[in-house]
Image (cartoon, rainbow, N blue to C red):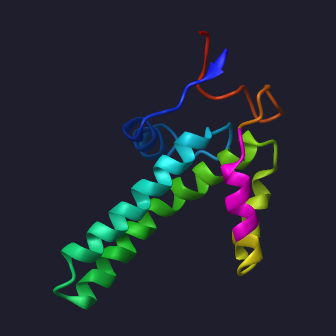
Amino acid sequence: MFQRQVTFQEAVKKALTVNYCNFSGRSSRSEFWWFMLFGFVLGAVVSIVFSFSPSLSRIVSGLVSLGLLLPSVGVGVRRLHDINRSGWWYLINFIPVVGTIIYIIWCAKDSDPTPNQYGPVPNLEAR
């Protein structure tokens, strides 16, 4: 048995459709980082496309950020579940520098290789 890495498209589709506002279950490391990359790239594209009008750029960026808020928190909480931590640890991000560094380190950790209280191992396949 091994944990299959999800593709960029799978991660974005899963986060925006199936798990849009889902805070239960587990999210693999690849799913989390692919979705974070999607949010970063989308924000950069919006900033570049609307650079001709700073006020319009702020409005569109705000709307995009608002639309991605719940899926981002959801995938972050599910990622914490994957390393066997409570989703409430997501609030560590509110500690200015240290909290964010700790959160990034946790999100970079390998998945818990066995089922835990939050669910089975995500994307588990037989070889």
Instruction: Place residue 44 in its image quadrant.
Output: bottom left
Q: Quick check: is 109 in the magenta stretch? A: yes
Q: Which residues are magenta?
A: 101-110
Q: Farthest left residue?
A: 52
Residue drawn at the location 81% of the way across and 48% of the way down: 85
Q: Position of residue 1 (x, y in %)?
A: 67, 14
Q: Position of residue 56 (x, y in %)?
A: 24, 84
Q: Is residue 93 shown above or below 51? A: above
Q: Position of residue 107 (x, y in %)?
A: 67, 52
Q: Is residue 98 shown above or below 119? A: below
Residue drawn at the location 48% of the way across and 44% of the way down: 15
Residue drawn at the location 44% of the way across and 68% of the way down: 66
Q: Quick check: is 43 in the magenta stretch? A: no
Q: Is residue 54 shown above or below 41? A: below
Instruction: Place residue 9 in its image quadrant.
Output: top left
Residue drawn at the location 26% of the way across and 90% of the way down: 55
Q: Is residue 97 shown above or below 16? A: below
